[in-house]
Image (cartoon, rainbow, N blue to C red):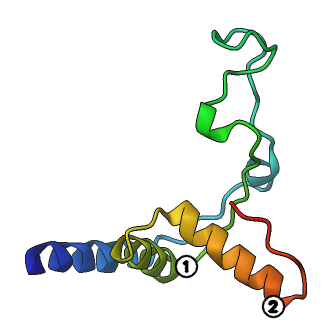
């Protein structure tokens, strides 16, 4: 197991290296992603087909430091969880902290 851990640490250190300072064009980050309409096969809906595991769900994304990403992935894996399940647990804990009711996954 130690060789795997070592290789993951090497990957973390490699990914944490500073990237060249290049600014992303302003319009690129804010531009919405275009969806194809009606060309998918499957459920017969007018939008792109959606995986069954994603039906009725909404994406929530964020940008975090490489260290946070690495820690979340490793800790979730260590506890036999998916990153999505770990994030759902964290969001529910935060909702409780703010006095709201947890909503599940």
Query: Callout 1 environment at 10 Å: few (<14), some (14 to 19), or many (20+)?
Result: few
Discs 1/2, front = 2
Q: Outermost residue toward the right?
A: 99
Q: Quadrant of residue 55?
A: top right
For disc 2, the marked residue is 97
Query: Callout 2 environment at 10 Å: few (<14), some (14 to 19), or many (20+)?
Result: few
Mark 1–mark 2 Cα distance, whole angstroms, equals 24 Å
* Residue 38 screen position, x and y as percent: 77, 10
Q: Nearer the viewer, residue 11 or 72?
A: 72
Query: Image check: 43 left or right of 80?
Result: right
For disc 1, the marked residue is 65
Identified at 60% across, 75% down, the residue is 64
As helix, strand or loop, the secondary structure at mark 1 comes to: loop
Identified at 28% across, 71% down, the residue is 11
Identified at 25% across, 73% down, the residue is 8
Tell me if residue 59 comes above or below residue 16 in the rendering. above
Q: Quadrant of residue 53?
A: top right
Identified at 37% across, 69% down, the residue is 80
- The number of numbered discs placed on residues in the rendered structure image is 2
């Amino acid at each position: 197991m130690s060789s795997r851990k070592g290789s993951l640490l090497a990957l973390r250190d490699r990914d944490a290296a500073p990237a060249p300072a290049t600014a992303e064009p302003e319009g690129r980050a804010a531009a919405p992603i275009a969806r194809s309409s009606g060309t998918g096969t499957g459920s017969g809906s007018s939008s792109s087909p959606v995986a069954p595991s994603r039906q009725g769900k909404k994406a929530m994304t964020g940008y975090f430091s490489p260290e946070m990403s690495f820690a979340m992935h490793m800790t979730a894996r260590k506890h036999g969880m998916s990153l999505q399940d770990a994030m759902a647990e964290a969001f529910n804990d935060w909702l409780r902290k703010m006095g709201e009711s947890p909503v599940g996954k």
